[in-house]
Image: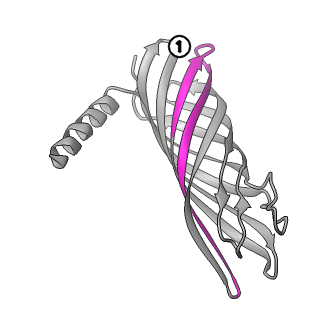
Amino acid sequence: MHRMLIVVISVLVFSSISLSQVGIGVSGGLLHPGIYKSEQSESQFNLAWGYELFFRHDLVHISDSFTVDARYEYRYYKTTIELPFVLDTWFKFKYLTVDFLAEFAASEQLNWYFGVGGSLVSVNAEKDFFYYTESIFIPEILLGGGWQIHTNYNIFSELSFQFGTLNNVLEESIPVSGFRCILGATMFLNSIE
């Protein structure tokens, strides 16, 4: 029964993707996961730089100027934090993200969007005798805008806000709530008229 359900869902997903506009892209920018300090030691993450790779497709066409898209991403960011007894330590954040974007076309070349999403984030750190690894779920909300420079290419800018906490980092919880600001480009593999 489970196999049949998986097959039916897979057929529906892939048939909807084949009838929609599909794109791949890259983006990069900064992540600031440390807008809050930890309560115990007041440790706080610094600004991070990173990159993102993604695949996106239309989910629903509500009208010519309003669509709902899905985007699947891999994100990599690296930042430092000053921890008690360990001092400056590099933390690596690897995101597997799914976002749902509601896109409004302001004109033929400009569009605006907002969305929600969630990420499974793998966090790793290592320095001297300190080792840390954890996987957490982090929700996010986002706003962005894009410019269609050609029927198959666009560039975009996006601002998102994430909410979460790393547990048991030297026996304390450290917030990873913050914002992300990126610039990116998409290459659409097909055009749906």
Residue at the outermost bottom position: 129
Q: Which residue is mark 1?
A: 65
| Residue 33 falls left or right of residue 99 | right
| Residue 75 falls left or right of residue 7 | right
Name the spot of residue 17 as percent of width and height, x first: 34, 32
Amino acid marked by disc 1? Ser
Name the spot of residue 161 as percent of width and height, x first: 69, 42
Secondary-structure class at tag 1: loop
| Residue 19 falls left or right of residue 175 | left
| Residue 153 falls left or right of residue 31 | left
Name the spot of residue 50 as percent of width and height, x first: 66, 56
Q: Residue at x 69, y 72 (%)?
A: 169
Q: Residue at x 80, y 53 (%)?
A: 36
Q: How many marks?
A: 1
The foreground one among 189 and 17 is 17
Say if the magenta span includes residue 103.
yes
Which portion, as a residue range, is magenta? 99-128
Quarter location, residue 82: bottom right
Name the spot of residue 65 as percent of width and height, x first: 53, 13
Residue at the outermost right position: 42
Image quadrant in which the C terminus is located: top left
